[in-house]
Amino acid sequence: MLDHRLIAFVRKSLRSIWALEVLLLLRRRAPEAVEIDAIVQELRATRSLVQRMVEQLISEGLVSRHGNHIRYAPSTADLEQLCDMLEAASRERPVALSHAIISAPLEKLRDFSNAFRFKVNNEDKGE
């Protein structure tokens, strides 16, 4: 089982497996900055996909951009600790980690739909 803090972090900050892969690649290369084209080539992804993932990671405070170079740079010590846990989970529990990322939209959709459910009150049923 993954730590509940890691699950919350993954569901909030990494909305896809691609974002996870970009973050882990940048973390492995730290403190070196990596060009977007190198990320594209190493991950065999499209440039537009990598750019979207980088923008997402920047907005979450996990990486920084310097021109066309991207660097792993968590903005807080807490984020650094969560990234440590993330890296360990990617080695030790990759399926659980993938499931945490993939299942996040389903849970959000379920929460949204439950907000519109009609609740039957026991008083309404004559009990």
Image: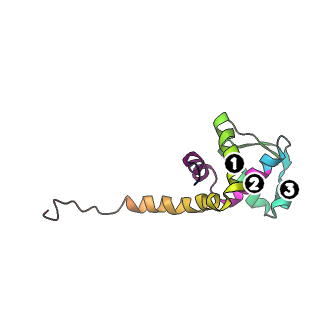
**In magenta segment, residue 8:** yes
Which comes before the other along the chain, label 1 or label 2? 2
CB-based contact (under 8 Å), mark 3 and mark 1: no
Badge 3 element: helix
Residue at left 75%, top 51%? 24
Cα gap from disc 3 to disc 1, whole angstroms: 17 Å
The one nearer the camera, 63 or 98, is 98
The amino acid type, in three-letter code, at marker 2 is Val
Residue pointed to by mark 2: 22
Residue at left 82%, top 55%? 39
Q: Which residues are magenta?
A: 4-25
Badge 1 element: helix
Instruction: Name the side, left or right, on which 78 lies relative to 41.
Output: left
Q: Residue 16: x, y in percent?
A: 65, 59
Question: Dot 2, crowdedness within 10 Å: few (<14), some or many (≥20)?
Answer: many
Which comes before the other along the chain, label 2 or label 3? 2
Q: Residue 84: x, y in percent?
A: 70, 44
Question: Dot 3, crowdedness within 10 Å: few (<14), some or many (≥20)?
Answer: some
- Is residue 77 something that shows in the picture? yes
Residue pointed to by mark 1: 57
Name the main secondary structure of what is drawn in magenta. Answer: helix
